[in-house]
Image (tube, coloured by chain):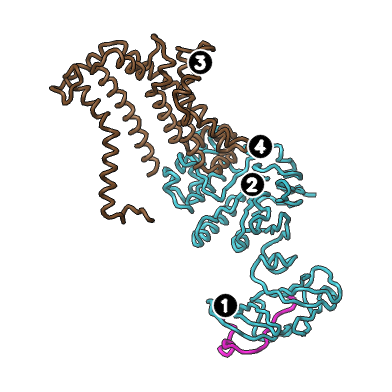
Chain colours: A brown, B cyan
Amino acid sequence: MLLDYDRMGWLKIALLGFTALVAAFLLLPVVFIVLLSFGSSRWLAFPPPGWTLKWYRDLFADPSWLEAALTSARIATMTAILAVMIGLLASFALVRGQFRGREILRGLLLTPMVLPVVVFAIAIYAFFLRLGLGGTSIGFVIAHTVLALPFAIIPIATALEGFDKSIEDAAIVCGASPFEARLRITLPSIRIGIFSAAIFSFLASWDEVVVAIFMASPSLQTLPVKIWGSLRSDLSPVIAAASSLLVGLTLALMVVTALLQRKVKT
Amino acid sequence: MIQPFLSIRKLHKAFGAFTAVHDVTLEIPRGEFLTFLGPSGSGKSTTLYAIAGFQDPSSGDVQLEGKSLLAIPSHKRSIGMVFQRYTLFPHLTVAENIAFPLRVRRRPDAEVKKKVADMLTLVRLESFAARLPGALSGGQQQRVALARALAYDPPILLMDEPLSALDKKLREEIQAEIRRIHRETGVTILYVTHDQEEALHLSDRIALFRDGRIEQTGTGEDLYLRPATDFVAGFIGNSNFLTAEHLETANGAATIRLADGSVVSGVSVNRTFDKGQKTRLMIRPEAFGMERKPASAELAVEIVDVAFYGERRRIVARTATGQEIDIRPTSAAMRSQDLTPCSRQVFFDPAAAFLFSA
């Protein structure tokens, strides 16, 4: 191959340098936030004059932060469950189905990924306002499920494509009804895809802010909305602490997913 | 009339304009090992899938002990099946795989345990019970699949080219295993393969498929020694076809004139030919001899090449009209002077040769 990594010579060093630069550019802001959340400066000065856990204590002392985190977790969990259930059914249709318009349906289900979020947010806000779903948990979950659906369908459909249908047929000849065969054989066989789908759709809701701002009400705020609101009123290191926790949980879930996927491959 | 165990009646299957199976009728007695043999696309797998219930036939019927199976869904047909591809359940251990058909039938634990142990013994994989399928070789996986298919004592076992993914040595090993299991369990087996040697080794009877129809059904010997059509003769074993003109038939033996002008009489026929009809004479390579025998017919050939194949030699010869023929006499029957390229006579028994229309 023309661009074989092993044959690049000095280009290899340049490429490594460039990649490191891009990674640093992407990661440094996150690292700064985390460092600042432990810094003693009230004004987010860098480098911090000293280190403290005060902001985390303040964070946990304020019930509105905890409430926002719980709201986020609740909505993200319901979104994940709903997205996985719909994603599972949709994947069976998209992978196994033989019907007209299958490709169109696939495209339609994946559009939330490419559609500008703010456009979707305004549209669903206007729509839900009429239905009286604005500012409700149900509205939140439905909106986030639409956004999370592509992240559920892609891993499940990929896993299902990689699963040999003869195995399901074998279960049926063994005496399992088609439903039982899918429940006891097909689903466990694609469980890693289902698990990835659950994590990704959880995260799609957990750190989503644009739609959330439109859906939120004073009594119903997710963590990203709370961070956004606090940023506008009062720039405090408590926000850095909250952001760090948000990033931390996301990172933990990604690591778990990666580990599980590796375990299955070996 | 004795009720046949499994009976396939005028089975017909069309996919749009393409007819995959054409009025196939077969009766299979209990305990038989019947092989569907044929080239790919000949309808043998489709017929098997219709019996399994994965394909609904366009018309015709499949009956088990006089009762139609067609209205019964696959999972209630009580059929065992081994597939071409590896179909063990990847997340279950070998023992759990074998137990699966018993578990879905809600059999008591003690019975399941005993049966799984019996099956593991049957396929000689006792020490593999706790392994996952991923940790088994292809041959072991197919043996587990066989154990799983037999675990609930199905009256019929269907096997769809179960050995085609394995290498030759392993294939022969498992063929022996399958024969032994058939002998020990007495299960009725329908086996699909495109490998004629496999069909000859394994089966009580072979149904040879061609273009959705059964060309001939019979024992391996029937098909080899008494082929009904030139397709059967060409598919089973090796054959030479010589063009010939039919002169006359009397008492089931024909007299013909070969392309080089020589006249041969006493040729086996299983249909009638017109006088002067163009025909093809089939002679097996091993039916040729280098010595004249009382009833022998002779053929003038030029020996082109002789190769040593162990118990047999393989000779490439050319007839007077330039057609290449394949001769395989036993090595012991050859003297050293036979081995050099030369022009000479070779001999064959006309009764072991068959006449087909051209």
Answer few, some or many: residues within 10 Å of disc 4's Cα (few below 14, many 20 plus, some between 14 and 19). Answer: some
Labels 4 and 1: the sequence-earlier one: 4
Residue B107 seen by the camera: no
Q: Amino acid at mark 4?
A: Pro
The residue at which mark 1 appears reads as: B312
The residue at which mark 2 appears reads as: B156
Look at the image and give the residue range highlighted in magenta.
B330-351
Q: CA distance from mark 3 to mark 2?
A: 63 Å
Which residue appears at 29% of the width and 12% of the height? Answer: A233
Evaluate if marks 4 and 3 touch, with contact meaning CB atoms under 8 Å apart. no
- Residue A186, relative to residue A81: is it above or below? below
Q: CA distance from mark 2 to mark 4?
A: 16 Å
Q: Amino acid at mark 3?
A: Ala
Answer few, some or many: residues within 10 Å of disc 3's Cα (few below 14, many 20 plus, some between 14 and 19). Answer: few
Q: Which chain hosts label 1? A: B
Task: Where is residue B283? Give x, y as percent.
Answer: 70, 75
Task: Where is residue A217? Give x, y as percent.
Answer: 41, 11
Q: Amino acid at mark 2?
A: Ile
The residue at which mark 3 appears reads as: A126
Of the two numbered discs 3 and 1 in the rendering, the one whose residue sits closer to the viewer: 3
Residue B52 seen by the camera: yes
The residue at which mark 4 appears reads as: B73
Labels 2 and 4: the sequence-earlier one: 4
From the viewer's perspective, is B110 left or right of B293? Answer: left
User: What element does badge 3 sit on?
Assistant: helix
Which residue appears at 60% of the width and 50% of the height? Answer: B159
